[in-house]
Image: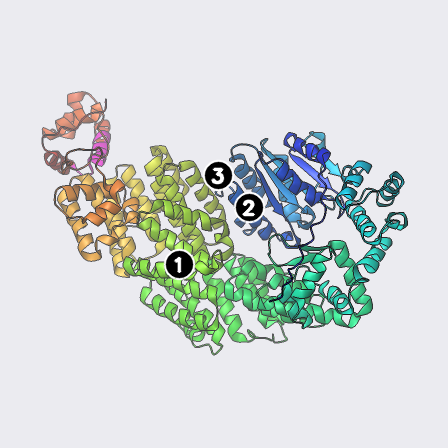
């Protein structure tokens, strides 16, 4: 090893400008503080110093770059920094999916405003280099949010140009603090202090001249002072602050002292926004870039370390512009090839966005080739937003003849629920006279896309014909055949054909894994989990979910990880690990829309809503279901709306009032569905039919119409069992057992519970079943207390709080039916006469009411007792025994 030590890295002098820091202290009096000035006026430095100056304030800094022009990235990064810095920031009010599901700016702004309003205490949001977020959507959202910003939230922005929205309203309302280049200019005192940090002593005439030439521009002043430090006295007198002279400074000071090798290195690396030694070696074909970078850094040649990427550097913006211009003059023949080599290296590192930016400045054909390779990477990883952003910028004509791009683009539109756009581009592809070229060219791609669009747009209303299935399954194109197998698996899953779905999914998983399609392979994993779970094999579903989740931990927050996390969150809920399930759902919620099919989005929303409801937080639970309602309006999602109806009914029964239950029933037209005799007879299983049916049975139970509820459940039970949808059959039969117990047929209820355990195992009666069959936990507790079933200690421990008796030390509950509703005084009087055997006319005469009124009271009594006629009512009284039905107080 060499005995020498590396020189200490250069640290540019920094000037603390107290008057500006005190001016920023006033930002707490305004909604928006806007720092507007060209590059080099010290805006970013000032913002960082103010954060250090005021550690007592809660601040969140979001430094922006060119990539933040993408709304999805901008709002995702904003959500991430808020969640990291503000533990109590509530992503249920706002999350970055708002920018992806085509909601209007007003809706996104309102969600952001509500989220910030829920943050307790003052909060400062600092946006550095806001000029990068120039997309109209972002500008509109921020403009609307600033108009209604909560009084305890303050926004500070730095920018090189005015924002894309008017500041007039904020000025008129005295809610804007503007700090511009006039405020940021250095004065004589500050210039003298900065010179002193560099070991220089300037005379008053020198200070005056330098201020006149630079007009207080911090970067220009610093460059002039560095020139004085390097070349000695007199540099300030000959320094000119106009841009040509500054460029001349770079040429004579930065480049003059470099060797020819270092000179070429500096010019060639100027095409790179950020770089490390390995990147430079690859682009320049060298092996000594680390040595050269160290030399340039130690010479204080405006090479800055990237704060968020250790070992990476960037040139000062002005120096980079100068070096690039010199490269174009001295070595113009190298420019395009340098950009091409940079694009190739970045693609190998998976940095597709930066690779594409370089390829746009490369030789002819470079951008098209880089876009094709990037698209393959995005498709394999499920990065559909990138596909939509880059390929969506192409013309229709360019897309129609690019087979490498058309299939990923239309697939991304379908996965993102933009069905009308997908149809538009698919029609263009089908009508194109010139055959498309590339990997996915040919009729098989068009057939696949057509079937995929029909499947996702029409959900269970779409039926794949046998000849279509054979055509997709037997496709000779390996990639399209793999995609088709996954699609066929999902189609079979939708229609509860679990054996076929499992076969297709296993084939798809194998082939997709071999071809490197990580995301679609994870989609096949999900289908297998759903097959296991719905067919009643919860043990296999749990094991597969655990393995799936473990495989994705090295690539957290990727689309595949989102899929796996959603699966394991549902498992944790079923295992009664509610806190962990909630944590996982909240972690995945901000990303679920951009990465997942609707199936998973609905699963996350409904699971998290239920978990919040179980904790008594009905307001936040309802906010989630309301947002899900808005999302589901984008397509033909009756199956998912039915799931939502069932969840809303369960929550209304648990935390709401009788009127709340009625509101849910009216919203989903449950009475109208009953009037159409939707569940009069058994029919082939359909998920939407079954979920609406369960919601209806719960509604009827709430209304004490127990015979009707029981009939609906019996129809659903037969249909579910015939189709092999055993998970739903357990839920339905658990509800049947509860109603049988309510009606007084406790023996039948207990037998049904024992039957469920015998046929499906005790593990099938998990937290999901106990929650979706309200009263089942109480029934299980009573069955165990009276030795009707034996619950092992581990089961009792897992569901301890659910199965716990009403109070500590309470005696075992009597095995008696639960009375759904107490009788009124009048109903009690009529019921006693009924038990004496009086006819309806005799009852009317005895208590002096009309016959029609007596019949109306009897109808209410029968409903409350869960019976259909007089004889059953008398038997019901006998089953209750000596307990007399108590009237309402």
Q: In the displayed structure, does residue 803 sit left or right of residue 154?
A: left
Q: Is residue 681 visible?
A: no
The residue under label 1 is 549
Residue at the spot x=17%, y=53% of the render? 755
Q: Which residue is mark 2?
A: 81
Does label 3 or label 2 sit earlier along the sequence?
2
Which badge, 1 or 3, comes first in the chain's sequence?
Answer: 3
Q: Nearer the viewer, residue 15 or 736?
A: 15
Instruction: From this view, report whether residue 6 is shown above or below residue 803.
Output: below
Q: How is the image coloured?
A: rainbow
Residue 867 is inside the magenta segment:
yes
- Residue at point 51%, 33% (across, down): 120
How far is mark 2 from mark 1, CA to CA?
A: 25 Å
* Tag 3–tag 2 contact (CB < 8 Å): no
* Front residue of 479 and 49: 49
Q: Residues within 10 Å of mark 2 (few under 14, many from 20)?
A: some
Quick one: label 1, few (<14), some, or many (20+) residues within 10 Å?
Answer: many
Point out which mark residue 88 bears: 3
Image spot of residue 75 (x, y percent): 58, 48
Residue 658 appears left or right of 761 = right
* Circle 1: element type: helix
CA separation, marks 1 and 3? 27 Å
Write down the region rendered in magenta.
Answer: 856-869
Crowd tier of the residue under label 3, counting other residues whose Cα lies within 10 Å: few below 14, some 14–19, many 20 or above: few
The numbered dot on residue 823 is none
Q: Residue at x 68, y 45 (%)?
A: 44
Task: Let me know if residue 107 appears in the view.
Answer: yes
Instruction: Tell me residue 374's x, y (percent).
Output: 59, 67
Q: Quadrant of the C terminus?
A: top left
Q: Is residue 506 above or below residue 62?
A: below
């Amino acid at each position: 090893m060499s005995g020498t030590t590396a020189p200490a890295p250069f640290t540019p002098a920094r000037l603390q400008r107290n008057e500006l820091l005190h001016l920023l202290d006033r930002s707490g009096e305004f909604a928006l503080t806007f720092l507007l000035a060209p590059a080099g006026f010290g805006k970013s430095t000032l913002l960082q110093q103010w954060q250090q100056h005021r550690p007592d304030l809660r601040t969140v800094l979001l430094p922006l770059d060119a990539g933040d022009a993408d709304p999805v990235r901008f709002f995702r990064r904003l959500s991430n920094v808020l969640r990291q810095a503000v533990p109590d920031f509530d992503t249920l009010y706002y999350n970055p999916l708002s920018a992806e599901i085509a909601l209007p700016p007003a809706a996104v702004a309102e969600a952001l405003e509500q989220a910030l309003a829920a943050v307790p205490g003052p909060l400062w949001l600092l946006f550095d280099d806001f000029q990068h977020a120039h997309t109209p959507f972002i500008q509109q959202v921020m403009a609307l949010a600033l108009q209604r910003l909560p009084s305890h939230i303050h926004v500070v922005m730095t920018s090189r140009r005015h924002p894309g929205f008017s500041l007039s309203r904020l000025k008129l309302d005295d809610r804007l603090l503007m700090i511009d280049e006039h405020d940021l200019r250095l004065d004589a005192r500050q210039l003298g202090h900065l010179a002193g940090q560099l070991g220089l002593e300037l005379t008053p005439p020198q200070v005056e001249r330098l201020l006149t030439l630079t007009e207080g521009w911090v970067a220009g002043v610093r460059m002039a002072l560095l020139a004085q430090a390097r070349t000695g006295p007199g540099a300030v007198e000959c320094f000119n602050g106009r841009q040509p002279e500054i460029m001349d400074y770079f040429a004579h000071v930065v480049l003059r002292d470099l060797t020819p090798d270092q000179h070429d290195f500096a010019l060639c690396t100027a095409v790179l926004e950020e770089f490390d030694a390995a990147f430079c070696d690859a682009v320049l074909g060298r092996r000594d870039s680390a040595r050269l970078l160290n030399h340039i850094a130690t010479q204080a040649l405006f090479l800055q370390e990237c704060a968020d990427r250790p070992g990476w550097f960037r040139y000062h913006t002005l120096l980079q512009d100068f070096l690039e211009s010199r490269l174009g003059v001295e070595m113009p023949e190298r420019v395009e090839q340098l950009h091409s080599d940079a694009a190739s290296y970045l693609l190998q590192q998976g940095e597709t966005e930066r690779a594409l930016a370089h390829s746009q400045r490369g030789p002819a054909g470079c951008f098209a080739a880089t876009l094709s390779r990037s698209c393959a990477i995005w498709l394999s990883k499920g990065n559909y937003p990138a596909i939509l952003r880059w390929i969506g910028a192409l013309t229709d004509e360019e897309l129609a003849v690019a087979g490498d791009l058309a299939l990923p683009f239309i697939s991304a539109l379908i996965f993102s629920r933009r069905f009308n756009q997908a149809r538009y581009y698919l029609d263009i592809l089908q009508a194109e006279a010139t055959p498309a070229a590339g990997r996915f060219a040919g009729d098989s791609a068009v057939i696949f896309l057509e079937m995929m669009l029909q499947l996702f747009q029409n959900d269970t209303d779409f039926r794949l014909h046998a000849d279509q299935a054979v055509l997709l399954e037997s496709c000779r194109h390996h990639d399209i055949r793999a995609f088709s197998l996954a699609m066929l698996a999902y189609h079979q899953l939708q229609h509860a054909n679990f054996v076929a779905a499992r076969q297709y999914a296993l084939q798809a998983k194998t082939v997709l894994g071999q071809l490197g399609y990580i995301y679609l392979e994870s989609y096949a994993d999900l289908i297998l989990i759903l097959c296991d779970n719905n067919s009643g094999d919860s043990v296999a579903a749990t094991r597969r979910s655990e393995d799936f989740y473990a495989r994705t931990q090295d690539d957290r927050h990727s689309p595949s990880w989102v899929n796996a996390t959603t699966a394991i969150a549902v498992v944790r809920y079923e295992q009664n690990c509610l806190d962990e399930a909630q944590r996982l759902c909240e972690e995945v919620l901000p990303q679920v829309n951009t990465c997942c099919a609707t199936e998973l989005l609905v699963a996350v929303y409904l699971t998290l809503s239920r978990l919040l409801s179980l904790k008594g937080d009905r307001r936040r639970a309802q906010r989630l279901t309301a947002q899900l309602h808005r999302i589901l309006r984008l397509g033909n999602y009756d199956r998912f709306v039915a799931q939502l109806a069932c969840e809303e009914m369960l929550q209304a029964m648990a935390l709401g009032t009788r009127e709340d239950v009625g509101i849910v029933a009216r919203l989903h037209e449950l009475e109208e569905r009953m009037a159409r005799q939707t569940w009069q007879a058994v029919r082939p299983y359909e998920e939407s039919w079954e979920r609406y049916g369960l919601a209806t049975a719960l509604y009827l139970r709430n209304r004490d119409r127990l015979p009707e509820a029981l009939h609906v459940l019996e129809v659903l039970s037969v249909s579910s069992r015939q189709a092999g949808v055993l998970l739903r059959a357990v839920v339905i039969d658990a509800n049947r057992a509860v109603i049988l117990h309510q009606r007084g047929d406790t023996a039948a209820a207990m037998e049904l519970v024992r039957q469920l355990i015998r046929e499906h195992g005790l593990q099938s009666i998990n937290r999901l079943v106990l929650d979706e069959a309200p009263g089942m936990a109480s029934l299980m507790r009573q069955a165990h207390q009276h030795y009707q079933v034996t619950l092992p200690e581990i089961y009792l421990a897992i569901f301890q709080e659910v199965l716990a008796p009403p109070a500590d030390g309470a005696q075992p509950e009597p095995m008696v039916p639960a009375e759904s509703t107490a009788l009124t005084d009048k109903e009690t009087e009529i019921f006693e006469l009924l038990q004496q055997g009086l006819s309806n006319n005799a009852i009317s005469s005895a208590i002096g009411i009309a016959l029609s009124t007596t019949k109306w009271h009897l109808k209410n009594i029968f409903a409350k007792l869960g019976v259909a006629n007089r004889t059953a009512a008398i038997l019901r009284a006998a089953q209750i025994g000596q307990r007399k039905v108590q009237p309402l107080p």
